[in-house]
Image (cartoon, grey):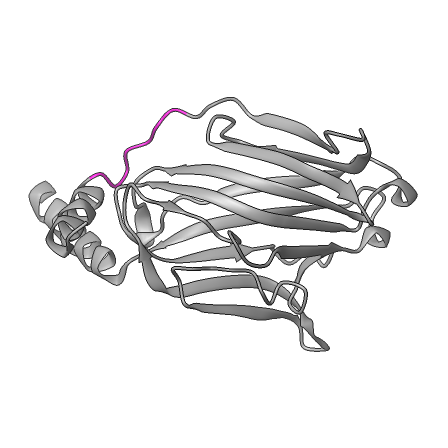
């Protein structure tokens, strides 16, 4: 995609602020090994059932290994934010029968949002029950984003993080992003002892290019002036 076309797409997204699409029914799956039938003790659910697909590769060695496929849809919203996709993980087994590590082996993320991505954000909102393991995730590929930074979950342990942000590249509108493909895995460790039913949310949000944000601001001013 050439640069001028990219800017035109961003401008179109700015004009579309406030438009809402129809939501698909919620989907919930139990994370079970497809070969052995071993149950991880985790259930995953998400609001847009037709946009997200989770595939369990295996449940072994105290971990569940999954692949994730997402079609990111919806235009830039108020504040210059693109819609996120949230996956809710809820413990369904006893502590003894629930794995304490969830591993994202790789992801297939398609940009259908009408704006180029200038970065990507993975977040586990701070409940103190789950966190990214920085050392185990150090080889996780974020290409074509060349800069990957974890933010500390706790000042007492730099190996735990609540956020991973990848920048320094572009995923154009209509293209597919493959985090983890060919290198590394994203490790989520869970403290099962903090609640009778442990739960946490994995939030993933694309970050629009700065050029798109500028056009969004210009588009917003144009709308205001037109209304006046």
Name the residue: 11% across, 53% down.
4
Q: Quadrant of residue 3?
A: bottom left
Identify whether 143 is placed above or below 147.
above
Residue 207 placement (x, y as % from top left) = 37, 55
Say left or right for 68 vs 220.
right
Judged from this view, the residue extending furthest toward the top is: 25
Magenta segment: 16-22
By secondary structure, the bulk of the magenta-drawn segment is best described as loop
Identify whether 160 is placed above or below 127.
below
* Front residue of 10 and 35: 35
Tally of numbered tags: 0
Say left or right for 49 vs 195.
left
| Quarter of the figure with the C terminus | top left
Judged from this view, the residue extending furthest toward the front is: 182
Residue 49 placement (x, y as % from top left) = 52, 27
Residue 161 placement (x, y as % from top left) = 63, 66
Say left or right for 116 vs 36.
left
Identify whether 147 is placed above or below 207.
below
* Front residue of 93 and 32: 32
Is 75 magenta? The answer is no
Say left or right for 88 vs 2.
right
Q: Quadrant of residue 186?
A: bottom right
Name the residue: 88% across, 45% down.
95
Name the residue: 64% across, 27% down.
28
Residue 215 placement (x, y as % from top left) = 17, 55
């Amino acid at each position: 995609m050439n640069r001028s076309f990219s800017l035109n797409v961003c401008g179109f997204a700015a004009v579309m602020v406030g438009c809402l699409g129809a939501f698909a029914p919620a989907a919930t799956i139990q994370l079970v090994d497809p070969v052995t039938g071993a149950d991880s003790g985790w259930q995953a659910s998400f609001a847009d059932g037709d946009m997200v697909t989770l595939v369990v590769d295996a449940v072994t060695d105290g971990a569940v290994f999954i692949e994730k496929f997402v079609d990111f849809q919806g235009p830039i919203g108020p504040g210059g934010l693109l819609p996120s996709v949230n996956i809710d993980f809820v413990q369904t087994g006893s502590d003894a029968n629930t794995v304490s590590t969830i591993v994202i082996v790789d992801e297939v993320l398609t940009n259908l949002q009408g704006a180029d991505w200038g970065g990507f954000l993975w977040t586990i909102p701070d409940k103190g029950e789950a966190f990214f393991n920085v050392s185990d995730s150090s080889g996780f590929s974020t290409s074509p984003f060349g800069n990957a930074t974890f933010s500390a979950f706790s000042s007492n342990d730099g190996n735990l993080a609540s956020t991973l942000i990848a920048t320094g590249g572009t995923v154009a509108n209509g293209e597919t992003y493959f985090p983890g493909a060919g290198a590394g895995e994203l490790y989520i460790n869970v403290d099962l002892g903090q609640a009778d039913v442990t739960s946490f949310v994995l939030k993933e949000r694309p970050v629009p290019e700065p050029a798109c944000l500028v056009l969004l601001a210009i588009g917003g001013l144009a709308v205001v002036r037109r209304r006046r």
